[in-house]
Amino acid sequence: MFNGIHLVYICKIIYIKFMLKKAIWLLLLIGTYAVAQNAPKTADKAADKLLNTISNRYKNFKTIKADFIYSIESKAEKVNEKQKGTIHVKGNKFRLDIADQLIFCDNKTIWTYSRESNEVQVNNYDPKKSPIRLDDIFTMYDKGFLSKIIEQKKEGKSEIVLIELTPKDKKKNFFKIKLTIDKTNQTIIKSQVFEKSGTIHTYTVTNQFPNVKLEDKFFVFDAKNYPKCEVIDLR
């Protein structure tokens, strides 16, 4: 029978998947690049060169930790919200801390722990079937996008470059992405995804720590560390 408890679980799963997708989007954006194919303008070639430089830097990282602020703004829906989060990545393993959720993934199993309810949901994780492919982290934008530099400015000792990405596939639900790049430190510090609905997703990276020491067990949920935690195994 479909009851209130089932509804709560369904709502939680939808929320968790939504937040996970948005957080991984952030990591994809801070660790990836775009190649502007057949770009006749100098600005496009300059954007391509800069993004490739950043890509090569991120590819050399064995692990990365990133603190970020995710905000969503929609005038039509009267939404303007912000959330802080932290994500750790080692290969295809990841651990995400955002809002009330702690999400662990060792590339085989994904655990979603709720601090509020002190319960964890366990699911199989198949990166090939998942809409989120962490193995695409550095290559997601190597095809299908045009890139161009739209602004360059100085902020303190850093040279800041704004790059706009536009998808060639006009069927996508977003029409552009703006990346704010610290050219001096070769890092992407902010990204904005503009949806056709008018919703704007903004990801601001507040800290990045490459090559931090992360044991494999860091990406596995251990119930011993969460007394009286209820385990809901959905595998």
Image (tube, grey):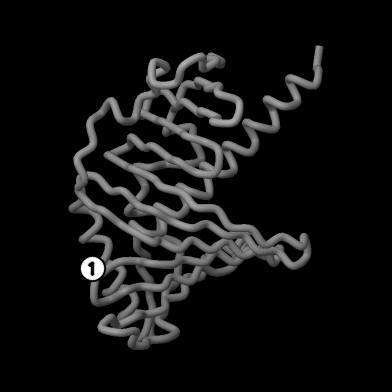
Question: Residue 52 appears at what percent x and percent y?
Answer: 27, 67
Q: Which residue is mark 1?
A: 53
Please say whether residue 178 is visible from this viewpoint: yes
Residue depicted at x 40% and y 52%: 27
Residue 160 image position (x, y, % from top left): 34, 80
Residue 51, percent from left and from top: 31, 69
Local secondary structure at mark 1: helix
Front position in the image: 126 or 36: 126
Quadrant that contains the N terminus: top right
Q: Seen from this angle, which residue lies furthest top?
A: 1
Based on the displayed image, in which of its 4 quarters is residue 106 positioned?
top left
Where residue 185 sits, quadrant-wise, is: bottom left
What's the residue type where badge 1 is placed?
Answer: Thr
151 over 50 or under it: above or below: below
Q: Is residue 200 left or right of residue 78?
A: left
Given residues 235 and 153, the one toward you in this image is 153
**Residue 147 versus residue 201 in the image, above or below:** below
Query: Which of the 4 image quadrants contains residue 161?
Result: bottom left
The vertical placement of 22 against 69, above or below, is above
Query: Can you say whether 207 is above or below 232 in the image?
Result: below
